[in-house]
Image: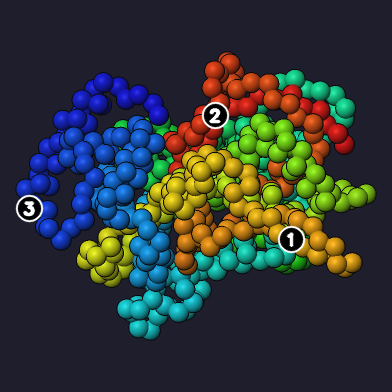
Amino acid sequence: MDTLPSIRLLALLVLLPLIAVLLSRQGSKPQSEPPRLSETIPFVSNTWQFITNKQRFINRVRKALKSSPIVSCWLGPLKIHFVTGGGNVSIIFRSSFTSEPWINRIQKYAAGYTSTDLQKFAEDKSGGLSLPRKGTKSPPPPPEKRIWHAMHRMNEDGLMNEYSVTTFTRTYQVFFNEHISKFPVGEWDEDVQIFAFLKRSMAIAATRSMLGHRIMDLYPDIVEAFWDWEQYGETLAFGIAEWLNRRAVAARNKFCGMCFRWYEIACQEYDQERVGDNVRVGEWEPIFGSQMSRGHVRWMKNFDFSDRTIGGIFALFSFGLHANTIPIGTWMLIEIIRDPDLYRAVQEEISQTIIKGHTCSEFLDYTKLASLPLIQSIYTEVLRLHVQILVTRTSIEPVKVAGYELPRGSVLQAPTAVPHLDEEIWGTPEHPAHEFWAYRHVELKEVRNATSQTSQQLEFSMKGRTASYFPYGGGFHICAGRKYAKCEILTSVAMIISRFDVEFIEWVKSDGSRSERSAIDSTGNAVATHPDRDMKVRWRRLW
């Protein structure tokens, strides 16, 4: 996070306390309200810490939630109620809560939608379900005119369709292989940085798979522009004044502008008569890429979005595509590579999925890969440790949470770090919850073969702990792209592990200089945490 000039810092420290005084005059806190997260300067300190040191802020929230299952504080203009406990978290996934107001904030501040287009969302009170929400004006608009429902259907059709996922599996392997194949077979490369390699190779392969070739042809540096904007996503979404967030706003406008200009050119080049009607549902084509991308185009045209909003829509599309997958893929490789025994075990397990005499389109059997117990356990463990999101919902009616009556419009957040790092749920005497353990989610099971001989084999198991595990959110608004994300992550990891011998060299800082310590979470990002150090390795391609 950039250091603010002293004059801005002075203004912040002068103006916000005055706002706090005015707010405090509205009346003292009723006894029926949840306890508040302590802060030195009311209405200021927590916001400032969230911006400048999110990890410390989340640690304070975790500590406070040990004393009370619900704790409140102000973050910028929003009053937030943090909750924990399986029962309380499950409440916010019910139909009496929605993520729509939080999505609106992301659309407005992080993606720069215009006020005219935001009003289209605000006016639709019917929700995303097939049946309009209770209280919707009668008669409700037809399904195709309900903007939230149409968006949900677009996501379901494009991201949950099995044929579309299969197409992505095939095209992603082709495009990711192009980056792997640049390394000659049998030759050691002495200077590979894992995160740097994946930030570019995975992003390019996924972008081409979902959006086609044309966007990369037009903007070879669009991946760098994405990562520049991605780091500011969460602070932008909270609506902090633009004069305090100028670099973030500039990064947003640059990336969104690239996305719109690509869309404009792609529309001119796309021949609907020749291509669109003849493309089987889920198939890939070079102009717009995937069914999901083409679905976005139809949805945007149906609701007549402005140029600026179209750029923001595809920016958020890219955010969903890269912001979780690439850091998680990096953490998986980091944990596997730094343990040679684990590397060999994973390499042996993945060998079952290699397609012998593979075609030019597929190298691994993804269906088999996704069912392997050890790779599933590592994937689950890395999500548990490194997806530190604030699952956000707003109540659409008065609700009771943890014994407190909260009014309609209350904003609740469930920090995944609280249950995901709970020692009572995940810890063992040898492997505490805050440490990575590859075998935390597998059990040894005795199996009997056709000749009645018995042997032991690993079996993936969450051991009844799914209520305390929600890296992709939950309820109606659970991440629709989770199948794509898992496919991209596991495929990338498996293609590297199966095709390279890898040896760890050292940890390096972002400038390439040597680090005396290993990577830890850098929590400035909105979803999966980035490693704050890169892993430098030497590797040799096997085939």
**The C terminus sits in image quarter:** top right
Point out the tag, 2 or 1, that comes first from the N-terminus.
1
Residue 519 image label: 2
Instruction: Report helix, strand or loop for mark 2.
Output: loop
At numbered mark 3, what does the secondary structure look like: helix, strand or loop? loop
Which residue type does callout 1 highlight?
Glu
- Asked if the residues shown at circle 1 and circle 3 are in contact, with their CB atoms under 8 angstroms apart, the answer is no
Instruction: Return the residue found at the far right.
Output: 357
Residue type at the position of mark 3: Gly
Question: Crowding at label 2, few (<14), some or many (≥20) Cα neighbours within 10 Å?
Answer: some
Q: Which of 47 and 328 is in front in this view?
A: 328
Residue 112 drawn at (x, y percent)? 42, 46
The residue located at (72%, 65%) in the rendering is: 163
Q: Position of residue 6 (x, y in %)?
A: 26, 21
The spot of residue 208 in percent (x, y) is 69, 46
Q: Hey, what amino acid is under mark 2?
A: Ala
Outermost residue toward the bottom in this view? 139
Circle 1 crowding by C-alpha within 10 Å: few under 14, some 14–19, many from 20:
few
Image x and y of residue 15, in percent: 16, 34
Q: Is residue 416 left or right of residue 365?
A: left
Q: Name the residue under label 1.
A: 446
Q: With 217 as the anchor, is 314 left or right in this view?
A: left
Against 265, is 394 above or below?
Answer: below
Q: Residue at x 31, y 49 (%)?
A: 66
| Residue that label 3 marks | 27
Residue occupying image coordinates x 41% and y 65%:
90
Q: Is residue 269 visible?
A: no
